[in-house]
Amino acid sequence: MEDLLRRAIVPTSIGEVWVLIDNQQSNLTVYQGNVELARFAPIRFGRGGADLQRVMGDRTTPLGEFHVNRFNYDSKFDIFIGLDYPTPLHARMALESGVYTEYDYDAYFDYYRRHQSPPQDTVLGGYIGIHGVGEGDMNIHRNLNWTDGCVAVTNQEIEQLASLIGVGTRVVIR
């Protein structure tokens, strides 16, 4: 995964619009190729921090390379931008670490093949994305990592982000 994250911060083309979320710097940057289009900071992560391996309920934000697979404009968080977590690489890591059984692993890929997206109800959890605060408390947002595993920005920032990216946009969380 570390090799993937090192390679993932290189744009696939000079015209690619992509997102880099940096856990250490607590910022989210939208690029077109290597050109910065927007930067939001500070951003918030899951209460459990960020890590390579996540399991349902631990409130950890997963690290990795993802793609936007949905937008929910009726979310309680203003706008919810869904990511394709867990990825096949996360499923493989779960199998290798014993979090997934062979049955879980096979069921993951069976679902993935049939739906062209990952299942959201495995032991790895799901419903990971980028969202606003909605009607939540801005004081909490300013001071704490508060999500259940998502990345949170302000409502104004999520609206700007949603105007810059679309379904299929690559998102790197490192």
Image: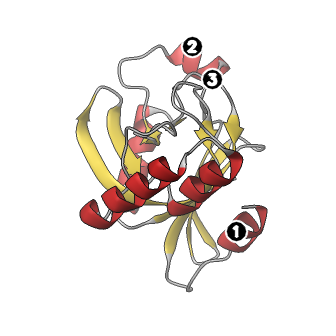
Which residue is nearer to you in this view: 34 or 76?
Answer: 76
Quote the CA–CA distance across marks 2 and 1: 35 Å
Q: Secondary structure at mark 1?
A: helix
As shown in the figure, which amino acid type bears the numbered disc 3? Answer: Arg
- Position of 88 relative to 146 (above/below): below
Image location (x, y in percent) of residue 7:
71, 74
Residue occupying the point 43% across, 26% down: 133
Circle 1 residue: 4
Residue occupying the point 70% across, 47% down: 97
Circle 2 residue: 139
As shown in the figure, which amino acid type bears the numbered disc 1? Answer: Leu
Q: Nearer the viewer, mark 3 or mark 1?
A: 1
In contact (CB < 8 Å): disc 2 and disc 3: no
As shown in the figure, which amino acid type bears the numbered disc 2? Answer: Asn
Which residue is nearer to you in this view: 167 or 155?
Answer: 167
Q: Is residue 141 left or right of residue 85?
A: right
Residue occupying the point 41% across, 33% down: 155
Circle 3 residue: 47
The N terminus, quarter of image: bottom right
Residue 109 found in image quarter: bottom left
Mark 3 or mark 1: whose residue is earlier in sequence: 1
Which residue is nearer to you in this view: 156 or 50?
Answer: 50
Which residue is nearer to you in this view: 30 or 67?
Answer: 67
Q: Nearer the viewer, mark 2 or mark 3?
A: 3
Q: Nearer the viewer, mark 2 or mark 1?
A: 1
Mark 2 or mark 3: whose residue is earlier in sequence: 3
**Mark 3 surroundings within 10 Å by alpha-carbon count, few (fewer than 14), some (14 through 19), many (20 or more):** some
- Position of 164 relative to 26 (above/below): below
Image location (x, y in percent) of residue 61:
60, 38
Image location (x, y in percent) of residue 136:
42, 16
Residue 115 found in image quarter: bottom left
Q: Secondary structure at mark 2?
A: helix
